[in-house]
Image (spheres, helix red, strand yellow):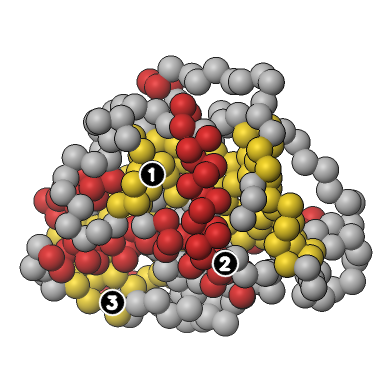
């Protein structure tokens, strides 16, 4: 593969690391390649970061043909740069692409592209623990016609944004509201695909929760509104009476790479981990009996996010006295330790550049 590189003539300024937020500042360049039916992927290029131009009838603007990924480039203490399970992101993007009738990526090629891009943007990977260069690969359909069909043209891009530590003031348990009006997705829908449309449809519930003073919603399944699915845009885990429980991947849940990694880490610690259906009644029952010991969300951005309060039917319940639990803390320390290169990578998850 031959990536054509056009370097920027106006290199940007890296903000102070203590002032980095999330997704507001972008690195100097972006990766772009095109796909056309019968031709395949072509015109791989890295160009200066900037606006793109789209035909007004472009598929993505009308029918939402868009999928994305999110992963980070981490700086280790020795100054080297590493990724965390990047092949998992590429495989998931292909699963999402299949669901949305977008073209497949060749895994090796996609990994090579990611590596070349991060190496070029090396100076944008911040140095402090907890900070990273957030990578956003995405793909969209851009047929220049309003006909509804499988796309015949698509674009794959990667942009990068230096990001601050998610927990600037330490890990604070969040307040979560159990949502019983909106649903995120349904089985048979697009819940397992990382597509923009899922986010568009779930924003309203998040906004409503935020107005009531909650940071996110806990989603229930779209068919019976009975089973726990995810928390905001994270997977969710509970420690109930000594057992770790996380919703099974029924098709309406996004298969998180952090979720998968947490399960492996927890099992290596000797915990019993069950991927199963968990009803809201069982959860509230456990809360009332004092058997819900810990609750947390998992995702690339926050790694793990402890849940300190849960609200259901206008009653607010405390989880672990509103404090971060022992398992949650251990998971956070282990995963971030591996990601930032402070701990031995005994699982073989790190991809060094
Ligand atoms: C991306 C995402 C997650 C977390 O996935 P990770 O691979 O752990 O970052 C969970 N739920 C939703 C809806 C997501 O979009």
Say if disc 3 is inside 8 Å of ligand 1.
Answer: no
| Residue at 8%, 68% in the rendered image | 270
| Residue at 40%, 22% in the rendered image | 17
| Residue at 55%, 51% in the rendered image | 113
Query: Closer to the camera, 29 or 294?
Result: 29
Position of 208 relative to 6 (above/below): below
| Residue at 22%, 76% in the rendered image | 274
Residue 167 seen in the figure:
no
Q: Is the C-beta separation of discs 2 and 1 under 8 Å? A: no
The residue beneath circle 3 is: 275
Decide if residue 168 is on the left or right side of residue 138.
Answer: left
Describe the element under mark 3 as helix, strand or loop: strand
Query: Closer to the camera, 243 or 208?
Result: 243
Neighbour class for label 3 at 10 Å: few (<14), some, many (≥20)?
few
Q: Quadrant of the C terminus?
A: top left
Q: Is the C-beta separation of discs 1 and 3 under 8 Å? A: no
The residue beneath circle 2 is: 106
Comparing labels 1 and 3, the label whose residue is closer to the camera = 1
The location of residue 211, given as percent across then percent down, is 51, 43
Position of 169 relative to 89 (above/below): above
Position of 37 relative to 112 (above/below): below
Kindly give the residue lying farthest to the front in the view shown: 2
The residue beneath circle 1 is: 353
């Amino acid at each position: 593969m031959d990536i054509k590189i056009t370097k920027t003539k106006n290199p940007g300024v890296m903000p102070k690391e203590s002032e980095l937020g999330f997704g507001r500042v972008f690195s100097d360049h972006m990766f772009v390649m095109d796909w056309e039916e019968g031709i395949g992927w072509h015109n791989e290029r890295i160009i200066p970061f900037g606006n793109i131009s789209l035909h007004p009838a472009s598929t993505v603007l009308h029918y939402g043909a868009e999928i994305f990924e999110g992963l980070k480039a981490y700086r280790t203490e020795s100054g080297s740069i590493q990724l965390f399970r990047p092949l998992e992101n590429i495989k998931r993007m292909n699963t999402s692409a299949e669901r949305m009738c977008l073209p497949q990526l060749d895994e090796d090629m996609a990994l090579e592209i990611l590596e070349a891009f991060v190496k070029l943007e090396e100076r944008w990977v911040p140095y402090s623990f907890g900070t990273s260069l957030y990578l956003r690969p995405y793909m969209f359909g851009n047929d220049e016609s309003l006909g509804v069909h499988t796309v015949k043209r698509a674009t794959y891009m990667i942009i990068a944004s230096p990001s601050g530590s998610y927990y600037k003031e330490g890990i604070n348990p969040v307040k979560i509201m159990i949502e019983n009006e909106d649903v995120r997705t349904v089985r048979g829908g697009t819940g397992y695909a990382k597509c923009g449309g899922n986010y568009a449809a779930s924003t309203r519930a998040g906004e409503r929760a935020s107005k009531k003073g909650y940071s996110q919603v806990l989603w229930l399944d779209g068919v019976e509104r009975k089973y726990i699915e995810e928390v905001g845009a994270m997977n969710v885990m509970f420690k109930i009476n000594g057992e770790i429980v996380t919703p099974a991947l029924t098709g309406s849940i996004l298969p998180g790479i952090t979720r998968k990694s947490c399960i492996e880490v927890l099992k290596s610690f000797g915990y019993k981990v069950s991927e199963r259906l968990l009803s809201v009644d069982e959860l509230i029952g456990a809360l009332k009996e004092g058997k819900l010991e810990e609750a947390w969300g998992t995702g690339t951005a926050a790694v793990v996010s402890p849940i300190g309060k849960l609200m259901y039917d206008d009653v607010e319940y405390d989880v672990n006295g509103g404090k971060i639990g022992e398992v949650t803390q251990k998971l956070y320390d282990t995963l971030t330790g591996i990601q930032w290169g402070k701990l031995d990578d005994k699982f073989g998850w790190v991809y060094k550049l």
